[in-house]
Amino acid sequence: MAVWIQKYVPKSLSEVAGQNSAVERLRAYAENYKRGTKPLFLYGGQGTGKTSSVHALAKDLDYEILEVNASDVRNADSINSLLGAGIHQMSLFGRGKIILVDEVDGLSGKEDRGGVAAITSLIVKSSYPIFLTANDPWNKKLATLRKKCELLEFRTLAYTSITNHLKKICELENITYDESALQELARAAGGDLRAAINDLQTFSYEGKLTKENIKMAYSRDHTETIINALTRVFKTTKSDVALPAFDEVQEDLDTIFLWIEENIPVEYKKPEDLAEAFSNLALADVFRGRIRRWQYYRFYVYCYNLLSAGIALSKNEKYSGFTSFKPTSRILKIWMANQKNLKKKAISQKIAEKTHSSKKTVAQDVLPYIKMIFKKNKEEAERLSKYFDLASEEITWLKA
């Protein structure tokens, strides 16, 4: 099963949804480009079609495209190496050429090591049209680069444009749908067409889309939600669907571990599926431990592969029906335990300061006797309360 955001990426500018004026200017810029013309800086939210429009333009004009992702190629040496020759060399096949520098706002102060300056220096020398993309072009670090470019906004897509695009996909994929459910899905995407297509593939896994299917599609801040990602993992047996599930999720690795651990037994009912899933989860945890112990950050890829494709392929066939995935209860239990121990820690700290002991020693060896005194000897308890400067709630805790 192909990932729909790849399957239905625009093959031509005519297929780009909801950006008519932007794509017209894009085409005119490329067709009329002359050396010395300012690069075109495309900006707008995620999923509005910036990168896909440049690729569609290249196909329409039969141009070669040289693409550099600034988030991956961060320093000046790498950028000069990849872009330096490309902006002057002719296409290998004698065709026209387009230069795309994607996600320039992915460069950050300490890590880019001159990346922004390198791009700024190179783009004014290009023999070919250059396009840059960013979600936020107004970032201070891009000020110099922005002045060297013409800005072109890709506006946030109206939910009606997203709805119409989703309808076409439903027809091509033979998906039956409830009109109101499709509109709700489009609204929930917040103008992000890519996220809406991901959701459609996720929630129409049984060949239909109903309001019940999209109960999990709550509002997002232009990013994939953890609920959607879990649905993609648990409701597929295809690695190419599961692997990118956590790519757009704004949760750290530890949180993803907790969500997966909590919901494996909710979704998987067969003992062999449970055993295989927890085995892959444990192996991912081994790599996480090595990352922390040895700082081998390249092991992150194994963690995410095991948490996505590893969990998805732990079953031989997907489980039908709607599953309500829930957040981990472990964090709540830890919080409750911490709240329960707060007074104990505070009292131990006060006693430790007065007795010149460690807080750990007081908690383990002294506090049990103090509690016994507070329960058995009222006068001594009052004396100790004043000496240790205990609050009323702390005294209550010691008497309990």
Image: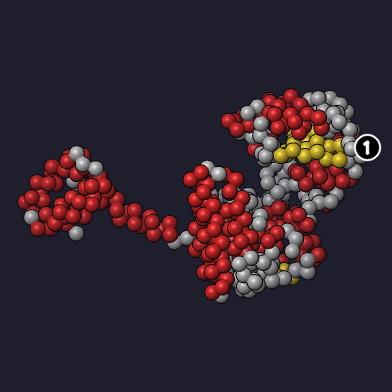
Q: In the image, is residue 241 above or below residue 66?
A: below
Q: Position of residue 178 (x, y in %)?
A: 70, 69
- Name which residue lies at 57% across and 53% down: 303
Q: Position of residue 117 (x, y in %)?
A: 68, 26
The quadrant in which the N terminus is found is bottom right
In the image, is 146 to the left or to the right of 27?
left
Residue 21 visible in the shown view: no
Residue linked to disc 1: 94
| Quarter occupied by residue 82 | top right
- Name which residue lies at 35% across and 57% down: 336
Q: Amino acid at mark 1?
A: Gly
Q: Nearer the viewer, residue 155 or 2?
A: 2
Q: Position of residue 167 (x, y in %)?
A: 77, 62
- Looking at the rendered structure, the secondary structure element under dot 1 is loop
Q: In the image, is residue 377 above or below residue 204?
A: above
| Quarter occupied by residue 209 | bottom right
- Name which residue lies at 60% across and 53% down: 302
Q: Nearer the viewer, residue 166 or 358?
A: 358
In the image, is 131 to the left or to the right of 250?
right
Q: In the image, is residue 50 above or below residue 149?
A: below
